[in-house]
Image (cartoon, helix red, strand yellow):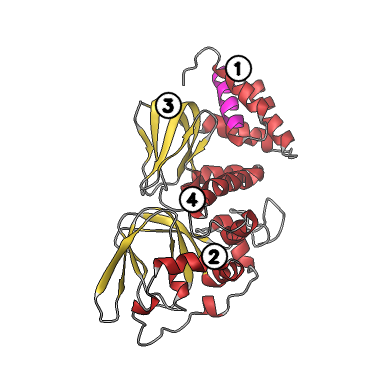
């Protein structure tokens, strides 16, 4: 990796403005190492550890992580990530600018040096939720998710910081002001998000079928789905496509416990799903949500009721307003591997390195 005059000074200045920023810390440490100043790199990672109130092995682990991470250079207009692809790598931008966009939404953000990219798919184990394109030459560190989990063993704030960053990027698209759940308060939105689970489906996969028991509402983050419902005479009514920001199953709750709209993925789809029991609480508190949903079904009687109900599964029959221990642990870590059942740390093994609990 080559450096231009002022790269190191600029990286340090960015980090000093926010010593709690993981991306700025890793970028500055890597720049110092390229300049041949390992002592400076260690002082910088030590500053990050001090800002988070951690010591011991954290500074050395961060410095080692910065040195070992591969670095790639991308040409102008090159794609660092493609929406819908299956990938678990994330990036820390060292130089240049990246434009992030989503199908059906448009441009989401422009990210510069010190920013993370791709952490949503890496943390939540879903398809890429957006496309990232270089604007001019871009240099970035390439970080496999497994490497980040290893780092988190020695630097527990890493998982929490990335999770909060990802959450704050996701909420505006899952429950923004233009969505059905946009009337909820920030606290209510966070409550639903904590109880949700990430999901990804491939084209052609069914999210919801006419007549099935409603167990979960799917909050669409990326991708497109076809939708249709049956009339009383059995004719098929094609509905507008389901796109990011829509909530599959939410309108059906007006009709009762069965789905009246069939939804199938057209493209790779990712999002978060939540039990209907938790959504019912929001509907009871905010009647305006039901009113908006009724507008989408101007003639509720036109929906064909299923002739026989499906058996209600235990997951909804036993639903309550309280989070189970497993749901707390799955907030960030709905994937393979062992998570702490106390604090949710994603790689706890036999004993959690974050809170010390035996798992």
Q: Which residue is mark 1?
A: 9
Per the rendering, the mark at residue 288 is 2
Q: Which residue is mark 3?
A: 138
Q: Considering only vertical position in the picture, is 103 above or below 339?
A: above
Q: How far apart, in angstroms, are the residues tagged by discs 1 and 2?
A: 53 Å
Q: Nearer the viewer, mark 1 or mark 2?
A: 2
Q: How far apart, in angstroms, are the residues tagged by discs 2 and 4?
A: 20 Å
What's the residue at 59%, 65% (across, down)?
Answer: 327
The secondary structure type at the circle numbered 3 is strand
What's the residue at 44%, 77% (across, down)?
Answer: 255
Q: Nearer the viewer, mark 4 or mark 1?
A: 4
Q: Nearer the viewer, mark 4 or mark 3?
A: 4
Residue 141: percent from left, percent from top = 48, 32
Q: How far apart, in angstroms, are the residues tagged by discs 4 and 1?
A: 36 Å
Q: Considering only order in the chain, which callout, 3 or 4, is on the residue closer to the N terminus?
A: 3
Question: Which class describes the residues within 10 Å of circle 1: few (<14), some (14-19), or many (20+)?
Answer: few
């Amino acid at each position: 990796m080559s450096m231009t005059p002022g790269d190191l000074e600029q990286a340090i200045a960015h980090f000093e403005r926010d010593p709690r920023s993981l991306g700025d810390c890793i970028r500055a440490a890597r720049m110092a190492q390229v300049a041949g100043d390992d002592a400076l790199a260690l002082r910088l990672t030590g500053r990050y550890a001090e800002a988070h109130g951690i010591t011991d092995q954290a500074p050395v682990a961060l410095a080692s992580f910065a040195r070992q991470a591969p670095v790639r250079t991308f040409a102008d207009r090159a794609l660092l990530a493609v929406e819908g692809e299956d990938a678990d790598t994330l990036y820390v931008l060292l130089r240049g600018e990246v434009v992030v966009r989503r199908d059906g939404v448009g441009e989401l953000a422009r990210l510069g040096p010190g920013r993370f990219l791709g952490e949503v798919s890496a943390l939540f184990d879903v398809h890429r939720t957006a496309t990232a394109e270089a604007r001019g030459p871009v240099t970035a560190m390439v970080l496999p998710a497994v490497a980040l989990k290893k780092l988190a063993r020695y630097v527990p704030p890493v998982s929490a910081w990335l999770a909060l960053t990802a959450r704050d990027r996701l909420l505006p698209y899952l429950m923004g002001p233009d969505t059905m759940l946009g009337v909820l308060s920030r606290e209510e939105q966070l409550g639903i998000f904590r109880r949700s689970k990430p999901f990804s489906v491939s084209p052609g996969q069914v999210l919801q079928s006419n007549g099935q028991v409603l167990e979960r509402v799917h909050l669409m983050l990326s991708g497109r789905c076809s939708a249709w419902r049956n009339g009383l005479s059995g004719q098929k009514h094609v509905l507008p496509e389901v796109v990011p920001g829509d909530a599959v199953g939410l309108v059906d709750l007006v009709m009762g416990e069965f789905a009246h709209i069939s939804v199938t993925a057209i493209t790779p789809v990712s999002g978060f799903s939540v039990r209907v029991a938790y959504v019912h609480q929001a509907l009871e508190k905010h009647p305006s949500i039901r009113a908006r949903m009724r507008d989408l079904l101007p003639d509720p009687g036109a929906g064909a009721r299923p002739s026989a109900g499906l058996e209600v599964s235990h997951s909804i029959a036993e639903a309550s307003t309280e989070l189970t221990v497993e749901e707390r642990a799955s907030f960030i870590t709905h994937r393979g591997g062992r998570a702490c059942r106390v604090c949710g740390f994603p790689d706890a093994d036999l004993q959690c390195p974050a809170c010390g609990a035996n798992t």
